[in-house]
């Protein structure tokens, strides 16, 4: 089963833009899908992650935030 990564992001967030580029590259290499959720468009996301963006979810489970840990993300996508 292919994994899915969600990047919880915010408009005009430089760190989010960098993270999305990294996630896109890693997912392409790992055969995983990915998508972006706008933290400010969803009150539940904003309440949970508003101060931590970018946040990374793997298959809907929080994996990390602020910076992509490439080796750790690759390991999660390989499992």
Image (spheres, rainbow, N blue to C red):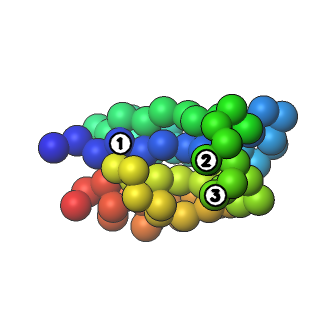
How many marks overall?
A: 3
**Depth-wise, is mark 1 or mark 3 nearer the camera?**
3
Image-based side of 51 in relation to 7, left or right:
right
Compared to residue 61, the image places residue 9 above or below, namely above
Q: Nearer the viewer, residue 26 or 37?
A: 37
**Residue 41 position in % (x across, y down):** 69, 32
Q: Residue shown at 33%/64% (left/top)?
A: 75
> In the rendered view, does 4 fall on the left or right side of 1?
right
Check if mark 1's residue and mark 3's residue have beta carbons within 8 Å: no
> The residue tagged with tag 3: helix, strand or loop?
helix
Badge number at residue 75: none
Residue located beneath label 1 in the image: 4
Which residue is disc 2 drawn over? 44
- The residue pinned by badge 3 equals 48
Q: Position of residue 20 (x, y in %)?
A: 60, 39
> Observer-nearest residue: 72 or 48?
48
């Amino acid at each position: 089963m292919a994994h899915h990564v969600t990047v919880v992001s915010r408009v005009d967030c430089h760190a989010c833009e960098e993270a999305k580029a990294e996630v896109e590259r890693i997912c392409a290499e790992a055969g995983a899908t990915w998508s972006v959720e706008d933290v400010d468009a969803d009150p539940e996301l904003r309440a949970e992650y508003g101060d931590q963006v970018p946040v990374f979810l793997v298959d809907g489970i929080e994996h990390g935030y602020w910076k992509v840990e490439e080796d750790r993300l690759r390991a999660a996508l390989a499992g």
